Image (cartoon, rainbow, N blue to C red):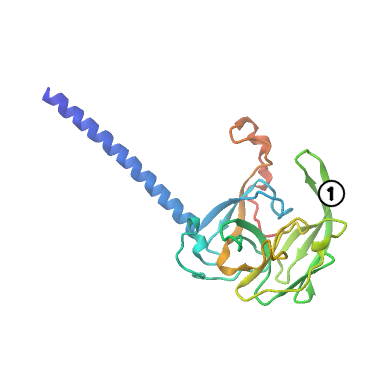
Amino acid sequence: MDRGLSGLAKKKKKETSGVAETFRTLVYAVLIAIVIRTVAFEPFNIPSGSMLPTLLVGDYLFVSKYSYGYSKHSLPFGLGFFSGRVLEREPERGDVVVFKLPRDNSTDFIKRVVGLPGDRIQLRDGILYINEKAVRRERIEDFFIEDRFGNSRAVTQYIETMSNGVRYRTLDVNPPNASDNTRVFTVRAGHYFMMGDNRDNSLDSRFASGVGQVPAENLVGRAEVLFFSTNGTARFWQIWRWPSATRFSRIFDSVGGV
């Protein structure tokens, strides 16, 4: 009888030890994930078409947190108790950047950096001017945008080339609208001027009440590579539809330019 009780106790102790070990493993895994998300890479998804044609709705990408150093927004839920940036590095013109919306410091936005501190930014007839010099723009084939009903329409597409050699595609709806002509914006010290590649359908630094100029502290990181893309025709539980909904050709595409 004593032997039976002893064996039962040992079995129970072993089961308890196994549960504790599993719990410790889960805790370690969570901590490692938090560290990676904080100092290395963080995943984001694209919910809108403001960065068409570079980024499509349903794209999932990794953002490098170390590219510009770290601020309180680098930590999960913005729990940092410090201001400014640590190990700060300045973005380059043409970088695609995730940042916190200045007016609430919580909403994630993704746009392209077109203006650095001290730059003068203006659009004239849809052409981007930086410090009074037009950014080179060449017309290429139309881009086709499909609505939720399956109807597609052609939109004028260009390739812009920054002075540092970064090349990327932009869209410009015809006929021109109000966002194709702006006043001259002088980028303030410690701030950046952001614009969406879908120029006529982007809430960005051209609109002071929407985004405005973005403080360096609000930068989260640089968009690097797509790791998944879906056209939205399959629900997460419709496994049989995943193959047709997945844009396999976009997986592992780099984000910066062409």
Is 86 positioned to the left or the right of 24 in the image?
Answer: right
User: Can you give x and y, in whole percent of width and height, for residue 182 in the image?
Assistant: 79, 68
Residue drawn where x is 71% and y is 54% of the image? 50
User: Can you give x and y, in whole percent of width and height, for residue 236 in the image?
Assistant: 59, 36
Label 1 amino acid?
Answer: Ala
Q: Residue furthest front?
A: 209
Pointer 1 residue:
154
Quarter occupied by the C terminus: bottom right
230 relative to 127, above or below = above
Quarter occupied by residue 106: bottom right
How many numbered marks does the figure carry?
Answer: 1
User: Can you give x and y, in whole percent of width and height, for residue 5 in the image?
Assistant: 16, 26
Judge by depth and name the residue closer to the eye, 214 or 41. 214
Residue drawn where x is 75% and y is 76% of the image? 131
Q: Residue furthest right?
A: 175
Element type where label 1 sits in the image: strand
Quarter occupied by the N terminus: top left
Judge by depth and name the residue closer to the eye, 244 or 203. 203
User: Can you give x and y, in whole percent of width and height, for residue 175 in the image?
Assistant: 88, 57
Packing grade of label 1 (10 A; few <14, some 14-19, many >=20) is: few
Quarter occupied by residue 121: bottom right
Is 92 positioned to the left or the right of 88 in the image?
Answer: right
Q: Residue furthest top?
A: 1
Quarter occupied by residue 23: top left
147 relative to 90, above or below = above
